[in-house]
Image (cartoon, grey):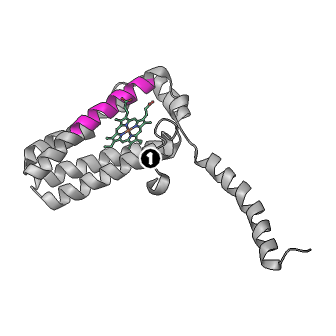
């Protein structure tokens, strides 16, 4: 008995697609944590905890109309750049070797959005604050989904 043509095509398709998907998954797995030196990892985790605290405070500031608080905390996130402030030239070399350029680009973009949030707060513009806050939250999940995939496997890749 020979396979019907559609079924044969389907099976052949599966043979081609499965290995392609496996390859794509490997490419997507760009977890950076293992490549970071213990010092860089420690600094990054410290920065992330500061950012999380600031985001919670900003959230409260936005929904209560406390623009001064939003501005202050958003500016603090923008200025934080622990990665920039506390790195020796040797650390910088380690970092550049450990993470792809896209990671640095995302970090810069994230800090730039924080500056935009501070500007929106200065204008006392709640709608603009909400838009920036949402953008920042998406960037958190996006960076974690792509670059912290082993530690945070629950972040689905839709928004990478
Ligand atoms: C450009 C990439 C990037 C962006 C943007 C980013 N993170 Fe992270 N985040 C990381 C990396 C990398 C780690 C893992 C550090 C490690 O475990 O070595 C991490 C870890 C964390 C952790 C765990 C910290 C700990 O105690 O170990 C928290 C919480 C966190 N991020 C919150 C946030 C929040 C909130 C945002 C957005 C407002 C955000 N991150 C944006 C890269 C990013």
- Image location of residue 130, percent across then percent down: 20, 56
Residue that label 1 marks? 155
Task: Kindly indicate the quadrant of the structure image that contains residue 70.
Answer: top left
Residue 82 at x, y = what percent?
A: 33, 30
Q: Which residue does the image show at 82% across and 78% down from the upper left?
A: 5
At label 1, counting other C-alpha atoms closer than 10 Å, the crowd grade (few under 14, some 14-19, many 20 or more) is some
Position of the N terminus, as image quadrant, is bottom right
Residue 17, given in percent of the width and then of the height, sits at: 71, 61
Magenta highlight on residue 100: no
Q: Report the side of 117 relative to 65 (left or right).
A: right
Look at the image and give the residue range highlighted in magenta: 40-54
Assign the magenta stretch its main secondary structure.
helix
Residue 46 colored in magenta in the image: yes
Q: How many marks?
A: 1
Quadrant containing ligand 1 reads: top left
- Residue 46 location in percent, x, y? 33, 27
């Amino acid at each position: 008995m020979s396979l019907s043509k559609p079924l044969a095509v389907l099976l052949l398709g599966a043979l081609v697609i499965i290995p392609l998907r496996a390859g794509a998954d490997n490419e997507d797995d760009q977890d950076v944590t293992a490549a970071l030196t213990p010092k860089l990892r420690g600094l990054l985790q410290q920065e992330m905890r500061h950012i999380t605290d600031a985001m919670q405070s900003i959230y409260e500031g936005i929904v209560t109309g406390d623009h001064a608080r939003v501005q202050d905390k958003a500016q603090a996130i923008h200025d934080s750049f622990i990665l920039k402030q506390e790195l020796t030239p040797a650390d910088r070399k380690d970092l550049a070797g450990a993470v792809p350029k896209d990671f640095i680009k995302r970090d810069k973009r994230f800090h730039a959005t924080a500056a935009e949030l501070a500007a929106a707060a200065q204008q006392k513009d709640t709608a603009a604050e909400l838009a920036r806050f949402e953008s920042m939250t998406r960037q958190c999940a996006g960076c974690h989904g792509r670059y912290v995939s082993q530690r945070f496997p629950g972040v689905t890749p839709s928004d990478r």
